[in-house]
Amino acid sequence: MKFFRQKEGGYKNNSFFLPASFSVCKSKIQNNNFYFFRILYLSVQSKLNLNWLPGEQSNLELSQQKALDNSAVILDELFKEYPVTQEWHQSFLNEFQLLKTEKQPVDTTWLYGKWMLNAAKDNNAKPLENFSEATKSNY
């Protein structure tokens, strides 16, 4: 399974992953705010334990649907904790609305991602073992 290769990023336990680049929005500021939004959104999703339990099996489509189905709960908490995210969220929805076509509906997976899986913690695991050598050398 290629867990962290999806465009929207995600989290696993205490590690957060983001897309390598994002340029869907018109302005650089909006594109940068997307990263802030996703970090805050993922942190709230993680805090609320809205993720797959160990042993549950899923596919990408079901994981994305679960994330969409639960996005209102996450957004409600996110907007309470970080009010500026409500404005960002609406601006992203407006941008994504412009990209929709007759064959392709609005793609909200950028915003809501997918249902994540927290793995059982392995106290013997080396930190950063899921990263490439190039990524490790930057930390």
Image (cartoon, grey):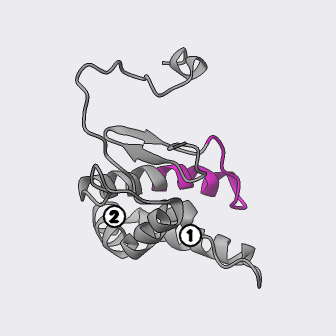
Percent position of residue 81, x then y? 28, 61
| Residue tagged 2 | 78
For image coordinates 25% across by 33% down, the residue present is 121
The 10 Å Cα crowd at callout 1, few under 14, some 14 to 19, many 20 or more, is some
The 10 Å Cα crowd at callout 2, few under 14, some 14 to 19, many 20 or more, is many
Percent position of residue 116, x then y? 39, 53
Instruction: Look at label 1 and name its amino acid.
Output: Thr
Magenta span contains residue 128:
no
For image coordinates 50% across by 44% down, the residue present is 3
Instruction: Look at label 2 and name its amino acid.
Output: Leu
Of all residues, the one furthest to the right in this rendering is 102
| Residue tagged 1 | 108
Report the side of 7 relative to 126 (left or right): right
Q: Nearer the viewer, mark 1 or mark 2?
A: 1
Percent position of residue 132, x then y? 56, 23
119 and 82: which is toward the camera:
119
Of all residues, the one furthest to the bottom in this rendering is 102
Gap in angstroms between the C-alphas marked 1 and 2: 16 Å
- Compared with 121, 84 (above or below) is below
- Asked if the residues shown at circle 1 and circle 2 are in contact, with their CB atoms under 8 angstroms apart, the answer is no
For image coordinates 70% across by 53% down, the residue present is 23
Report the side of 93 relative to 40 (left or right): right
Of all residues, the one furthest to the top in this rendering is 137
For image coordinates 70% across by 59% down, the residue present is 24
State the extent of the magenta-drawn residues as a range.
Answer: 20-37
112 and 90: which is toward the camera:
112
- Compared with 13, 24 (above or below) is below
Secondary structure, mark 2, is helix
- Compared with 80, 5 (above or below) is above
In the rendering, which numbered label is found on residue 13?
none
90 and 16: which is toward the camera:
16
Magenta span contains residue 36:
yes
